[in-house]
């Protein structure tokens, strides 16, 4: 398996502040399933931002999908972003759009027609248990329902890389289990999954997933497994 | 080329469906109204100056200070002169009528020496010196003057006002586009979250810009058409009155080209506003990742 993401001595600071991420050296195998853990403030969200191209590193090199994107011109980034699905911690749903339109957005951006959108979006909403809430707007949805819309939006276009920041933070245990099933199903279809979570139950329910632990802005990798993964992972 | 104007319902929903939000259409309407009035005035002045200039280009006046006892002979001489195409003596009654404005009833006095005045037109290349010699032979005190010499300052003023109107049209257009730039920036701020989400899922700057461009184009079109319609209404009302009749409905009317220019003005303003908005949005988006 090839690496879908390669971080080489990556550091990140916001403005003139201290580095929130430093000396990040790791590779994520294409088709892998990763849990990103660590205490609050360890840099999990910042690392995810680098992964979903919302932030550029202040030093080091990042390769995604085999392409060097550290200094790629911003016009070159949208096609790569379309290959990444993101579930945000704060959902990031557009308040004045219905659940249907929020979920359909990635397909519309990719140029799909209304006919091509209708079926998959209805199906995805049904899968996350919101078939009857398709026309509801986010402010009228509960936190858990918003979370599910956000997840549906992230996976609707079958991304190659799915990045989720605390995806089970607002859902009940049953829904958390269903989400995990969705993630593993996507993973079996070839999607690389990176989930930032504190949920130990979620991690233990996913045998075979790799763990990336962050502490004080760095990756804990005493054996060098993340920097130089064994061939079975890469 | 303008396919962005026909966005799908879903694309329209992205920025909300509320129209007339903010003062932009009203500002553009006021600018469009002012542009319409000023442009019409400038074009009418241009047309009037052109007609006047053409009409007097070959027109001359013979003035005999102490009147002409032999006015008929003078007129006959002018008519028989080579190159003279038309001769028009001004009746003494008309002269006295004119003098009456300054002199009052004294202008009727038989003792008052009333100058004789004969206007004549020449064909191109006419020998004015030869005409002058023939006139002097009949009336030695006669003076020939070109109408254009007397009207040139007026024409110059009209041309200056015409250029001033053109400059004002440009200034108002610049002010309208500045308002559009401010509106575009305001819209970007209002929809910053939507833009971030769209960028995040892979939307290009052009895809995002088209949404704003369409909305601003519609606001600009509504504003400029409303303003131009109000301007046209005012012009029609003015033209039907005496004060403006000479300019618009009399000898020097607005020509077909002038009407076409006025008709195109709101669309030109819309196109300019849309183009400026597009540039402003693209420039602002470049500051983001």
Image (tube, coloured by chain):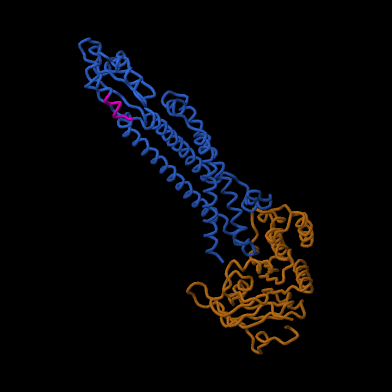
Q: Residue at 36% across / 25% down in the picture? A: B82
Q: Colour of chain A?
A: orange
Q: Say whether residue B84 is left or right of residue A48.
A: left
* The magenta segment: B127-133
Find the residue positioned furthest to the left: B111
Using the image as rendered, state which of residue B140 and residue B224 is in the foreground. Answer: B140
Q: Position of residue A210 (x, y in %)?
A: 72, 81
| Magenta span main SS | helix
Which quadrant holds the N terminus of chain A?
A: bottom right
Q: Residue at 33% across / 21% down in the picture? A: B78
Residue A186 figure quarter: bottom right
Q: Position of residue B76 (x, y in %)?
A: 33, 17
Q: Say whether residue B92 is left or right of residue A41.
A: left
Which quadrant holds the C terminus of chain A?
A: bottom right
Q: Is residue A132 above or below residue A155?
A: above
Chain rendered blue: B
Using the image as rendered, state which of residue B246 and residue A166 is in the foreground. Answer: B246
Find the residue positioned furthest to the top: B110
Q: Position of residue B79 (x, y in %)?
A: 35, 20
């Amino acid at each position: 398996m090839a690496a879908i993401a390669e971080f080489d001595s990556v550091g990140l600071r916001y403005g003139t502040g201290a580095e929130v991420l430093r000396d990040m050296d790791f590779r994520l195998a294409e088709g892998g399933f990763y849990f990103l853990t660590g205490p609050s403030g360890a840099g999990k969200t910042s690392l995810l931002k680098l992964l979903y191209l919302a932030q550029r590193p202040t030093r080091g090199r990042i390769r995604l999908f085999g392409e060097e994107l550290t200094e790629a011109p911003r016009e070159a980034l949208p096609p790569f972003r379309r290959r990444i699905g993101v579930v945000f911690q704060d959902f990031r749903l557009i308040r004045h759009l219905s659940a249907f339109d929020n979920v359909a957005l990635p397909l519309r951006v990719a140029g799909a027609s209304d006919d091509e959108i209708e079926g998959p979006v209805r199906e995805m909403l049904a899968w996350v248990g919101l078939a009857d809430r398709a026309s509801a707007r986010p402010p009228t949805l509960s936190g858990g329902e918003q979370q599910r819309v956000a997840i549906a939006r992230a996976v609707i276009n079958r991304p190659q890389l799915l990045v989720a920041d605390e995806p089970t933070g607002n859902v009940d245990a049953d829904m958390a289990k269903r989400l995990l099933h969705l993630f593993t199903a996507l993973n079996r279809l070839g999607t690389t999954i990176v989930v930032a979570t504190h949920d130990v139950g979620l991690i233990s329910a996913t045998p075979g997933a790799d763990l990336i632990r962050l502490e004080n802005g760095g990756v804990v990798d005493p054996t060098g497994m993340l920097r130089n993964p064994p061939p079975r992972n890469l | 080329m303008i396919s962005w104007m026909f966005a799908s319902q879903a694309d329209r929903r992205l920025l909300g469906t509320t129209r007339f939000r903010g003062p932009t259409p009203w500002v553009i309407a006021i600018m469009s109204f002012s542009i319409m009035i000023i442009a019409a005035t400038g074009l009418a002045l241009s047309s009037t100056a052109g007609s006047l200039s053409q009409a007097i280009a070959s027109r001359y006046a013979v003035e005999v200070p102490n009147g002409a006892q032999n006015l008929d002979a003078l007129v006959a001489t002018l008519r028989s002169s080579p190159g003279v195409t038309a001769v028009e003596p001004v009746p003494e009654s008309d002269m006295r009528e004119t003098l009456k404005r300054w002199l009052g009833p004294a202008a009727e006095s038989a003792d008052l020496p009333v100058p004789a005045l004969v206007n004549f037109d020449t064909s191109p290349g006419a020998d004015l010196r030869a005409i002058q010699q023939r006139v002097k032979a009949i009336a030695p005190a006669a003076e020939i003057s070109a109408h254009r010499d007397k009207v040139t300052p007026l024409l110059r003023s009209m041309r200056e006002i015409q250029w001033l109107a053109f400059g004002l049209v440009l200034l108002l257009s610049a002010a309208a586009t500045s308002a559009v730039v401010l509106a575009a920036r305001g819209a970007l701020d209002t929809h910053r979250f939507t833009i971030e989400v769209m960028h995040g899922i892979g939307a290009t700057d052009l895809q995002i810009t088209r949404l704003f461009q369409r909305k601003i184009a519609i606001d600009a079109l509504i504003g400029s058409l409303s303003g131009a319609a109000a301007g046209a209404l005012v012009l029609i009302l003015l033209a039907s009155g005496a004060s403006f009749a000479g300019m618009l409905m009399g000898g020097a009317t607005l020509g077909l080209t002038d009407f076409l220019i006025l008709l195109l003005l709101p669309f030109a303003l819309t196109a300019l506003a849309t183009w400026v908005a597009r540039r402003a949005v693209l420039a602002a988006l470049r500051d983001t990742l």
